[in-house]
Image: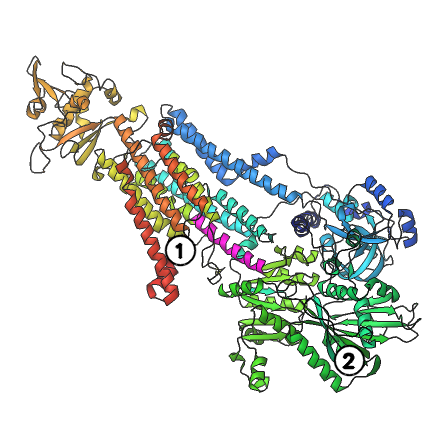
Amino acid sequence: PRSHPPQESPPPAMSTKQELEMAAAYSETSSRVADALEKKKAGKSTGKDPDDLKKEIEMWEHRVSVEEMCERLGTSAENGMTSANAAAVLARDGPNMLTPPKQKPWWVKLGMQFLNFFAILLQVAAIISFIGYALHPESSDHLILGIVLYCVVILTALFTFFQEGKSEKTMEKFKNFLPPESLITRDGKKSKMDASVIVVGDLIDIELGDKLPADCRIIVNNKLKVDNSSLTGEAEPLSRTVECTDDNPLETKNLAFFGTLAVEGTAKGIVVNTGDRTVFGRIAGLAASAGMEETTLQIEIHHFVVIISAIAISLGVIFFVIGIIKGTGWIDNIVFCIGIIVANVPEGLLATVTVSLTLTAKRMAKKNVLVKKLECVETLGSCTTICSDKTGTLTQNRMTILHLMYNGRIETAKTTTTEQSFDFNDPTFKALFLGACNCAKAQFDQTELAEHPDRPIDERAVMGDASEAGILKWAEKLTPVMEERAKSPQVSGIPFNSTNKFMITINKDCNNPGRLILLMKGAPERIIERCSMVLENGQERGMTARDNEVIAENLQTLMEGGERVLAFAQYKLESKYDENYEFDTDNPNFPLQGLTFVGLAALLDPPRETVPYAVSTCQQAGIQVIMVTGDHPDTAKAIAKQVKIITDPTRQDLAKSRGVAVEDIDPSECRAIVVPGWEIKDLVEADWDRVLAHEQIVFARTSPQQKLIIVENCQRLDKIVAVTGDGVNDSPALKKGNIGVAMGISGSDVSKEAADMIILDDNFASIVSGVEEGRLIFDNMKKSIAYTLTSNIPEITPFISFILIGFPLPLPTILILVIDLGTDMLPAISLAYEKAESDIMLRPPRDAKKDHLVTKKLISFSYFQIGMMQAYAGFFTYFVIFNDYGMSPQILPKLDAGANFATDISEDKRYLAIRNSVPRGYSYARNWFENDGIFAKYFTSGSPLPVQTEEEEDLFSGAPGAGAGVVGAPANEQFNNMIKIIGYEYQIPPCFEYACTSGGNGTALIENDWQACFGDATSTVYYNGFNTGVKNPNVMEHQDSVPNSGCFDVWTNEMQDETLTFVHSGFLLSIVIMQFTGVMICKTRILSLFSQGMTNWVLNAGLLQETVMMIGLLYIPPIAKAFGTNHLKFVHWLPAIPWSVGEFVYDEVRKMLIRRGNRTGSGIGLWMREFTYW
């Protein structure tokens, strides 16, 4: 049974939406009120003067008599409002709902999306790109980059805006802060109604655990205490009375306010204010809507993004300074600085995280797990201990009476499998039946009963807890219970509470008119200790030691079967205790000792079918399941064995089997222990260490306060504790636990408010599903981040190689964005759809102190293992393509140190002279043809050849034209002179055919003769092979020892640009090919891909999308032109493939070694786990 006072359960047919409202409504409005109260304490304005709040609340209802108040409100203290009056008041006042807070206009929310850190960073980059374009309009690269960056900002802003819109729509249902239903009496009939239809004058029942649906005047009080912390911030329960104690409505004890919580006792009240007119509503009206706090997961991701961004900006600034020192133009430096920043920042990460969380929330909702606080999803992955209630969580919460014990014998009740053996006419049974009918609060839902009068008793809805419902249904089958209660109306009583563990009713004695009888029901040990008499065959006699032995033996027999046992007692009060006697239930002024023991009722709440498997799953996952219950130790142990919480003998079991005393059994022999609540108070820290060292633990007969002590001691031992609870007094333990788990059906509003998660079906197996989902989201987010970061190194290293080594830029910024927001996006998101690895519930819980979402090992894996392999693949492809187009890797360093290669800026364009071993062969040296370096002397008057007098850019006008009567000969004189200068300086011929004129008149034509053409300073050289492509037949293969061996060629800016587009395309393609393998690698953290399979069809679609995107980028001309790519030869798809295979093999071997280390303890496997398991 639950270790808390009984309470009324919502109807079984309650919808998920109602459960959501019960769970989350309180938080939203309470935060608004808390915000207002904090502003008051800080002396800040809340829109009105807070000191005027009490003055504004003018009420008369608490000062007048109940009769006068009812007359003025048009209601009755016994029968409540009439339906007609209620309808009129509802039309006048409107529904009992709070007005939602004002919302920011949509355009303001959209505008805010452009002001976050990422957006500002990218917008600044875009603006600088536009400035670069304005300074050099002939270069469209800057314009395209700026447009793309702004598109990224806009798309990201729209995505976030619409996601937040969805979240707000989800939260709209929570704005009104109402329990879904309340118990209302109208027209003399009591029934549950939607709280929104409550009106001023309604008569409502306030039960333990209820959240008050309106302000009300208390007219009947039974030890009611309320928690006013939502109004005052003070959690100390305050008692209520029927009498007015203060003229100030906020101070008087005969008013209870909307939104406060009934934490003890019961009461009846007349509603005096509803909706915005309640005290809570007035305060909420003063407060602006409180913003949602960042979750720990969001904080961690934000922290990670800030670190990555700081690294990116730092690298950008460092290499900007290096560029300035090297003399690179400041615009080019800034653009490359932007490239480094863009390469470092994973632009698609936040979208991936958002989708992951959304998917997880949907998955958990399907498994009946409502996550109120997002951060608890992260904590779930590290849960090591679950402290679980028994009733309704491990069991079905469908109590059925199986046995009765009276007259010293156990009798059987009628069930589907047994026949009744008791005698209905036995006088002791009649006394037991009297107590069962009257010492209770449960009753059938009258509204449901009126609508379905023929519904079978077992299927009727009951307002009351599971035990009382079981007794009520059993008794109703014998005789109508309400008729029995009418024969013995209740005069007074003490409700059940978890401290006393009993309840008392004082009723008129139907067998002795004019006299009263006290009926008591509760835990057997609490009842028996108050009894000195026993009822046998209808006669009272003194209780003997033998009676105690018989009762104990029968009690043991029943509890060993896992049945919950309640004891019943009675006391026929003396004549002075009549109807007019004022019974003080706070300080009882009537007998509570010397009672007469009547009998026992044993109920069975069978375990849920799914629980044993779920418990075994937890144990395999390294999660300890501890049962914490208010049941008797024997009952608790029996259920614990059935659900596999206990599978080994306890110390008592070993003592019994060996026939020795319990003290003779060494505690270290036992893996299982059952600790009763009466022993907990004497445990010191060393005792707790000993108890919690057991693998199988049950705490029985515990109070909610003891549950809190259990949780605290578990946490002291560094356990990550999930706590289940459904009672009001469970809230301290729920709040104290790392994860508070409330029950959606049986749970009180207080417990749901305190909890982080709500299990909508009250099923323990759903908790285990939640744990698995918690581990899965943690796994999948790690995988997405790991995959996203693997492309950072191959995106950063091109810029580093450009700045430090002077390579022509291997990958431009626009193609980095293509990777981050194009090819990588869907595969990264698809990992959120990845199913759990088969060992996810076989691993020990993660160490929450070490195994964070982003760790050093994950950075090492993504950057320095997989990332470096991808960079190697990219540069290998880069060198292969350059080599195939005539530039060997050895001539690439410092080639673009002056940013001349394939430049769009006219004054920076240069011809590139390359020395090859043979035409189209190996190249071994190169120089820019410019007024600098080895060619500078040819631009001066002291030149040994005709002076190169024109500006360098004029070389490019008319270079392809023909002249001098030689087929294909260039007509540009400066171009021809340049060829003469290069050949003369290099002392080698051109790689392709050439001709020259010799002699004074320049009419003799000589072909492919280096000495005649380049040895004669007066000859004019025509490089016709530049246009015809015919090789020079006289070239000798280069050898250092052979003069004039080898040849040279020149590259125009167009040739440079075309080659660079092929190089960019190849580098991009190599990253995408490596990311194909990368996403497969990131599918699992420890299992082989062959075990996990490729059944994630969203991921498969992502791979297909990458392929289609690459084909479009490379082979559709308009797209290729827009992004600066080119159609690669098939052979250039191949260089990255061996690296991709190597990447896959490396990771499979790494995972295999880790698994072997886990399995066999091999040194290399343990080393790999220590340093590479992310």
Within 10 Å of disc 2 (Cα), the crowding (few <14, some 14-19, many 20+) is many
Q: Mark 1 is on which residue type?
A: Ser
Secondary structure under the numbered disc 1 in the rendered image: helix
Specify whether 1022 is left or right of 1063. left
* Mark 1 touches mark 2? (CB < 8 Å): no
Name the residue: 53% across, 51% down: 297
Q: To which quarter of the image does residue 555 belong? A: bottom right
**Residue pointed to by mark 1:** 1091
Dominant secondary-structure state across the stretch colored magenta? helix
The disc placed on residue 773 is none
Residue 1107 counted in the magenta span:
no
Quadrant in which the N terminus is drawn? bottom right
Specify whether 1075 is left or right of 916. right
The disc placed on residue 407 is 2
- Image location (x, y in percent) of residue 31: 67, 49
Q: Is residue 161 above or below residue 718?
A: above
Query: What span is in magenta?
Result: 765-785
First of labels 1, 2 by sequence position: 2
The CA span between labels 1 and 2 is: 64 Å
Nearer to the camera, 1145 or 25: 1145
Q: Nearer the viewer, mark 1 or mark 2?
A: 2
- Image location (x, y in percent) of residue 396: 65, 62
Secondary structure under the numbered disc 2 in the rendered image: loop
- Image location (x, y in percent) of residue 862: 38, 50
